[in-house]
Amino acid sequence: MKQLIYVVLCSIMLTSLAQAKVFKAYNGDIDFNHSKHMGLFPCTECHEGPPRPFPGGLDKQKAHKLCIGCHTKEGAGPTRHCAQCHGNASKD
């Protein structure tokens, strides 16, 4: 029974984490497709420990190192121009 509860709680947590994220930034919000990235990379590629929000949030320095660093390493996605990420968030 405990295992079933654990599985259900983990599933709920992962489902909520898989939603699209919008990171607020002064030069334009960033629309991040978390589900797409989860399908391409293991959680440990970005998160240390179990998947959860980044401790202390994801500030400019951490985001640039993590996101641009990975895109550069993979040779895919935005890497050069701010507008490739910033200002593309969906408007309500």
Image (spheres, grey):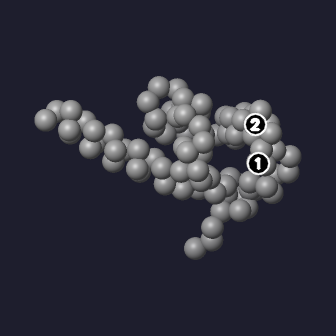
Outermost residue to the bottom:
92
Q: Residues within 10 Å of mark 1 (few under 14, many from 20)?
A: few
Mark identifier at residue 41: none
Left or right, residue 3 beside residue 87: left
Q: Are marks 2 and 1 in contact (CB under 8 Å)?
A: yes
| Quarter of the view holding residue 3 | top left
- Position in image of residue 55 (x %, y %): 51, 33
Q: Can residue 59 be seen in this view?
A: yes
Q: Position of residue 80 (x, y in %)?
A: 86, 46
Q: Measure how far apart labels 2 and 1 are at the Cα level.
A: 8 Å
Q: Is mark 1 on a helix, strand or loop?
A: loop
Residue at image location 33% in from the left, 48% down from the top: 12
Q: Residue at x 81, y 52 (%)?
A: 82
Residue 91 drawn above or below residue 64? below
Residue 17 in percent (x, y) is at 45, 47
Q: Is residue 56 visible?
A: no
Residue at label 2?
74
Please report the residue visible at 13 percent of the width from the left and 35 percent of the height from the top.
1
Is 66 drawn above or below residue 25 in the view shown?
above
Q: Residue at x 41, y 44 (%)?
A: 14
Quarter assignment of residue 73: top right
Q: What residue type is labelled 2?
A: Glu
Please indicate whether residue 13 sits to the left or right of residue 66 in the image: left
Disc assigned to residue 77: 1
Residue 29 in the figure: left or right of residue 9: right
